[in-house]
Amino acid sequence: MQEFYTQIGDLQPAFCYPQHIEALTLEDIQNACQEYLNPHAYGVVVVRPIQ
């Protein structure tokens, strides 16, 4: 919590964070993706077990 307070300056948003996440709609997420994610700027990561 101290780190959150240091970055934001207020702890109240941290206590309401789960409710804010649960209130998101599919449309909210799609809009954010269209605004912030670039389909041409990505990387592929493959994880395999050590043999």
Image: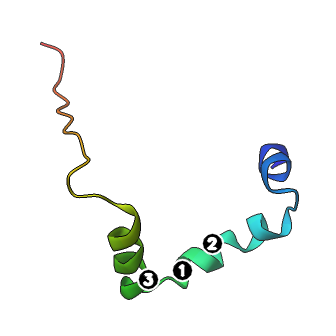
Q: Nearer the viewer, mark 1 or mark 3?
A: 3
Nearest the eye: 36 or 10:
36
Which badge, 1 or 3, comes first in the chain's sequence? 1
Name the amino acid type tagged 3.
Answer: Asp
- Label 1 packing within 10 angstroms: few (<14), some (14-19), many (20+): few
The residue under label 3 is 28
Q: CA distance from mark 2 to mark 1?
A: 6 Å
Nearest the eye: 15 or 7:
7
Which badge, 2 or 3, comes first in the chain's sequence? 2
Residue 33's x, y, as percent?
35, 69
How was the colour assigned to the protein in this rendering? Answer: rainbow
Residue contact at pointers 2 and 1, CB within 8 angstroms: yes
Which disc number belongs to residue 22?
1
Q: Is residue 15 left or right of residue 37?
A: right
Kind of element beneath mark 3: helix
Residue contact at pointers 1 and 3, CB within 8 angstroms: no
Name the amino acid type tagged 1.
Answer: Glu
Which disc number belongs to residue 18?
2
Residue 41's x, y, as percent?
26, 48
Q: Is residue 22 left or right of residue 47?
A: right
Report the quarter where the C terminus lies. Answer: top left
Residue for point 49% across, 82% down: 24
Kind of element beneath mark 2: helix
User: Where, by quadrant of the figure, is residue 11 drawn?
Assistant: bottom right
